Amino acid sequence: MAQDLLVPGNLILFATILAAVSGVPLLFPCFFSVSRAQLLSIFLMLSASFAGLSGSIVTLFSGRSASYELLWTLPFGQAEFGIDALTAWFLLPIFLIPGCASLYARSYWNADQHLANISKMTFFFGLMTASMSGVVLARDGISFLFVWEIMALSAYFLVSTEDEKSEVSEAGTLYMITTHTGTLGLFALFPLLNLLSGSWLFPASASLSASSWLSTAIFLLALFAFGMKAGIMPLHIWLPSAHANAPSHVSAAMSGVILKVGIYGLIRILSFFHGVPLWWGCCVLVLGVVSGVVGVSFAIGQHDLKRLLAYHSIENIGIIFMGTGVALIGQKVGSPAMMLLGMSGALLHVLNHALFKALLFLGAGSVIHTTGTREIDLMGGVARRLPYTALLFGVGSVAICGLPPLNGFVSELLIFLGLFQGIQGEGGAAVVVTLATPALALLGGLAVACFVKVYGIVFLGVPRSEAHSARHEAGWAMLLPMSILGMLCIVIGLAPGVLISPLQRVTLAILPPLVGVEGHSLPALVPTTMITLAGVFLLTLILLITFWYRRRLLDSVCSQTVTWGCGYQRPAPRMQYSASSFAEMLITLLSFVLKPHSHLSGKIAGIFPGRTRFSSHVPEAVLELVYIPLLKLLYQRFSGIRRLQSGILQQYVLYTLITLVVLLVGSFI
């Protein structure tokens, strides 16, 4: 029995069950005190994380796979679950991030201080983790939809944890509407896949031709349904408000993991096809470019710390789409190097983004926990009271900007190398890839500008408001998960060669016919040794400069004074850069996309102008200027149909009877 449990597949299934029941102790406070129940829930989640990660790592490095059948009497055939390299890769963030977030919640969302919602939140957090695992394990359309819906509902209850607040309730409602809109796409996708393959079970990799109209319909539905879950632009409208209003450790799990489940679904569907047309790859690549550039542009204009991080999730989902698009174009043009580099870069960025984005959300939660606000303009000087949080947030900031020697640089480098392979080709594919290459470089530059703004305003300078000044550093339960994620960002950045072999195995499992060309392997295409040497040199140089500077400070006389204030005799904290003033030039350049709103009370005129106020914000332009006006128009056009909704029960029964008769007649025609 013990030997069976140690089989990687069994470990993963055991971990999924443990995660699902991890929140149960808090549902029965009569048996435990609330504090002890939370500790037991954390222990169960950490055990699930350890077991799931162990099984996934063994599967990745051994290449073993397994399948399991569930006996049930539903009229859709057998339910099958399986574990392969692709599943194991996505299980890494699925089990790692919730484990870190669960430990973080011990201090951030302590049970004794949140009696009203701790039971609901902990239960649905475990259920969401288990259902995300179930989604990537499912091997048939019906099982996939079952666990997908459990995941969607669990995430809704987590987003609306503090539903007594109107903005939280609105964010939850928007999430519920959009997630079920995406699910409607899946309800159409899987019957079409059944029609094409002849079974509800998932077909083998590269077993279906992409040349039929059914294949095109499946691709478009997958792009819509999974793109909405992943938060690709312009299907991202639920993401900023949901991530901003959920508890920070929930935001870390949603941004770091649940978005990747959408990426998994798209890659899994794409893996069924061979002979994909060029426009599939170009479409995915262009969507990635648009999402990346527009997402980071909106992030620059944000004043809310968590909403800013949410827009960066949209940007990084765009980078993953770009890598996937490069791989699809590589299939069409017959370039194994493009396929290997593009898909490997996308998959590595799935893991990397989960690490540094979870780190940033947890760091933001630590700052919000001590300052009591999410508004960047009310913060300042946080690093003086929270030095460890400032250091770890800085690690996440460097990583998300794609700078060496951290992990974000490695995955973006792989995608760059794939793009460079495409530039050397001919025809329309080369043109699209050539245009996409500078866009990826632009993303890095804009991300640097954004995080210089965030770090400078939040952590440096002096507090802008006494009421929101930082009070104390986070406890060990919050710092330990952040430290683990930060160390992983550094380790992957310095030693990416460890992951190259598993990455190639995952890519081979997705599209095996395309990588049998001799001389094209990922270790030969990626200079991992040079990356490691350059990273170690750069990190050593940074540490030496830091050590030298610290020694110089200790050996010199230090005095405290205010920063030079442009000649003012009495500079005040409010004269520091604000989120608006720092990003004003970039916001003006991008105003045709961002549509910023500015408010100025009174005029500034004369030698001694009177008191006036200025404020600005960047709205959710896609939602407010596109979707809402369109929905209002549809509401007006179809107002007559609302008469069918009379509220009379007998009339609804009549509708059901008519529908059944029509279906029965249709079955005989």
Image (tube, rainbow, N blue to C red):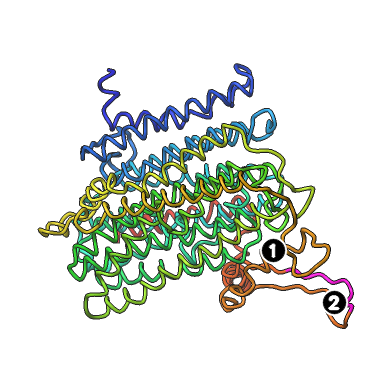
Amino acid type of the residue tagged 1 in the rendering = Ser
Where is residue 636 shown, x and y percent of the image? 63, 72
The residue shown at (61%, 66%) is 301
Q: Nearer the viewer, residue 509 or 222?
A: 509
Using the rendered image of the protein, determine whether residue 640 is visible from the camera's viewpoint. no
Residue 487 vertical position relative to residue 572 in the rendered view, above or below: above
Q: Which mark is residue 249?
A: none
In the image, which is nearer the foreground, mark 1 or mark 2?
A: 1
Dot placed on the residue nearer the N-terminal end, 1 or 2: 1
Image quarter hosting the C terminus: bottom left
305 left or right of 572 in image: left
423 left or right of 466 in image: left
Local secondary structure at mark 1 = loop
Categorize mark 1 by other alpha carbons within 10 Å: few (<14), some (14-19), many (20+): many
Amino acid type of the residue tagged 2 in the rendering = Gly
Which residue, as the protein is rendered here, is positioned at the far left? Answer: 518
Where is residue 69 shown, x and y percent of the image? 27, 35
Image quarter hosting the N terminus: top left
The residue shown at (36%, 47%) is 492
Q: Which residue is mark 1?
A: 578
From mark 1 to mark 2, how far is it between C-alphas? 20 Å
Q: Which picture quadrant has residue 74?
A: top left
Local secondary structure at mark 2 = loop
Magenta region, main secondary structure: loop
Magenta residues, as a range?
608-615
Q: Which residue is mark 2?
A: 602
Q: Is residue 250 magenta?
A: no
Q: Nearer the viewer, residue 358 or 31?
A: 358
